[in-house]
Image (cartoon, grey):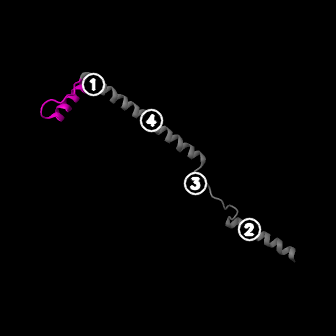
Amino acid sequence: MENNWKQIKEALTLTYQEVLDINKDYHKELISFKTLVKIQERKNKKTTTAKQEHSKSRHKLNTQNQIIKRCGALEPTGKNTWKSWQRQWKNLQENEI
């Protein structure tokens, strides 16, 4: 009698586990390792492009400043110094292009 009861109990627990899916009590990782690697690669790519753009703009500004220092062109003249400075700056830029 006890032997039959054990078999019935085992059969019932197996069917319950299959129906209720108790054995699959695990969760997938929300972010896998591959996606973390891809995210890191994108960040590295963004920083390298940003650094390159920054260095290009810095180089451009340095060359413009050197030209201005050599020419001595931007000297405030007249009453409206800011406007005259802007005009001289535009003239320098147009002459370089």
Q: State which tag comes first along the sequence, 2 or 1.
A: 2
Q: Amino acid at mark 2?
A: Thr
The residue nearer to you, when weighing 17 against 45, is 45
Residue identified by numbered label 1:
69
Which mark is on residue 30?
Answer: 3
Looking at the rendered image, the disc whose residue lies closer to the viewer, 3 or 1, is: 1
Q: State which tag comes first along the sequence, 2 or 3.
A: 2
The residue stretch that appears in magenta: 72-97
Looking at the rendered image, the disc whose residue lies closer to the viewer, 4 or 2, is: 4
Residue identified by numbered label 4:
49
Whole-percent x and y of residue 15? 73, 68
Residue at 63% in and 58% down = 27
| On-image quarter of the N terminus | bottom right
Would you say residue 80 sits in the magenta stretch?
yes
Number of numbered tags placed on the structure image: 4
Would you say residue 18 sits in the magenta stretch?
no
| On-image quarter of the C terminus | top left
Q: State which tag comes first along the sequence, 4 or 2.
A: 2
Left-right relation of 1 to 77: right
Label 2: which secondary element: helix
Label 4: which secondary element: helix
Image quarter of residue 26? bottom right
Q: Residues within 10 Å of mark 4 (few under 14, many from 20)?
A: few
Looking at the rendered image, the disc whose residue lies closer to the viewer, 4 or 3, is: 4
Q: CA distance from mark 3 to mark 1?
A: 58 Å
Q: Amino acid at mark 4?
A: Thr
